[in-house]
Amino acid sequence: MDPIDASAPFPDGFWWGTATAGHQIEGGNDASNWWAWEQLGLVEDGSTSGRACDYWGRWPEDHQLIEDLGHNAFRLGIEWSRIEPAPGAFDEEAIDIYSRILADLQARGIRVCLTLNHWVLPNWLAERGGWCARDALTRWERFLCRVVPVLAPFVDTWVTLNEPMVPVLAGYLAGLHPPGRRNPWDAAKVFRRLLAAHAVAYDLVHDLVPAAPDGGPTLVGYAAAYQWVEPFHGDGWRRPVEKVIGSVVSHVSYGAWDRAVLTGRVPLPFGRGERVPGLRGSVDFVGVNYYMRVSVRLHPAALLNVASAEFDCPEGIETTEMGWQIYPPGFRLALNHVWETFRKPIFVTENGCSDSGDEVRRRYLVTHLAQVRAAIADGCDIRGYLQWTLMDNFEWREGFAKKFGLVEVDHTDPDLVRRPRPSAELYRRIIEANAVTPEVVAEFAPGALDAWR
Ligand code: FCB
């Protein structure tokens, strides 16, 4: 691959901002399945989302902050359970608040990327089987018909589903997210349901929204997690085996979903080629969530067992406070992979790192942005970058213990004061220059780019 010119400007009109999810920041999302799950004490630090960041009460202040930090885009989600807390009972006030939130962003010149579902379901639906419920898709459609036309005047891009493989794998196979199931048949069923849910949402938004607010085409896509999967060993006999296992890992974690959207059919191991109506080609852009490389390591002692492979971090590679490998070149590779797979515009819908000290985050930010710039130079049509995330928030399984924010929030502080970290200023300066300039790197993350030319 060509060497990186990290300081080259980004394209004109590039989207710069952060990504968030309703449940993680709003607070009081108490009619949802995640809320119910938290009450069972299943979050690692014992916390519950509770008031989260109280974005629901403080959005004007947060939007001012976003503006002060120089962002021109914001990704946020709507919470189905807040809008429809009981079956068929829509909360007009909640819909009105969402409209006001989005209208305020628009009035500030901040482009909106709206996520229609970021994993969380109304608890009434979860109790009937969640995405496995017989009427899940008709309920979903009815919910969308109610909200999409109201919110459409303020939405620049639509993300139907966030990381659909997470509910499939963490919720139904590993049992780590609600509903805590470990059943491969259910996992496969949810995979098929989510494909259908995406296809339904894609069609419906196109039917109801003839154009984006700026008069351009309506853009609908999904956001998927793309880890860069590689063998742990650089050479030797284990490498080819690790490669094979790695291709299974990437197929299961994102490849199968992408294949399904491209072909309109459900691939193995989630199905046997069944056609999903409306699915084929149902993507106007791809949302790329990239955080890490995953290295597949084979342990010879357990060679006859699939579990003989595990994820391990090669020596000399730094990890974040989540234990995730920091591997910037994987980002460029993943972006090229997505571009080659779809040849559709790409938005980076998430990328970031958990770091309470903020020193790692500054290096992470410049090194990963340099890779985005390189991918653009490679020919990928990348339209924007949304950092995960604006402020420290409720991080699902890890609760409040993990700190992904450009802005620090102490969740024990009764006032939940927002304190921008140095990386927020670093990001502001990059946005202002529309480039990762040598000056800003020297000031905020000296030497960071040297390791990843
Ligand atoms: C992604 C999720 C997002 C956040 C980050 C850290 O997988 O989409 O909500 O939890 O990880």
Image (spheres, grey):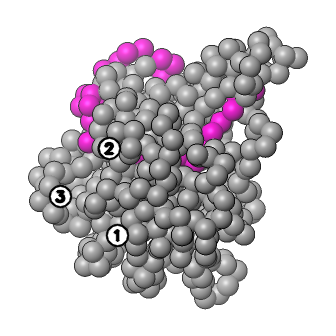
Dot 1 amino acid type: Asn
- Residue designated by label 2: 381
Q: In the image, what residue type sits under mark 2?
A: Asp
Helix, strand or loop: magenta stretch: loop
Label 1, on which residue?
72
Q: Position of residue 248 (x, y in %)?
A: 58, 21
Residue 445 percent across, percent down from the top left:
64, 65
Q: Write down the region rendered in magenta.
A: 268-297
Alpha carbon of mark 2 to alpha carbon of mark 1: how far? 19 Å
Q: Identify the disc placed on residue 212.
A: 3
Q: Residues within 10 Å of mark 1 (few under 14, many from 20)?
A: many
> For disc 1, does the CB lie below 8 Å from ligand 1?
no
Is the residue 87 above or below the residue 297 in the image? below
Q: Earlier in the sequence, mark 2 or mark 3?
A: 3
Residue 241 vs residue 309, the one in the foreground: 241
> Is there CB contact under 8 Å for labels 2 and 1?
no
The answer to whether mark 2 is within 8 Å of ligand 1 is no
Where is residue 312 shown, x and y percent of the image?
A: 76, 35
Q: Nearer the viewer, residue 221 or 361?
A: 361
Residue 76 visible in the picture? no
Question: Mark 2 packing: few (<14 Cα in 10 Å), some, or many (20+)?
Answer: some
Nearest-to-viewer mark from 2 and 3:
2
Report x, y in % for residue 385.
42, 57
Give the distance between the C-alpha atoms of the residues marked 2 and 3, in whole angstroms.
19 Å
- Compared across the picture, whether 416 is left or right of 307 comes to left
Question: Which type of secondary structure does the marked residue at label 3 adopt?
Answer: loop
> Of circles 3 and 1, which is in front?
1
Q: Residues within 10 Å of mark 3 (few under 14, many from 20)?
A: some
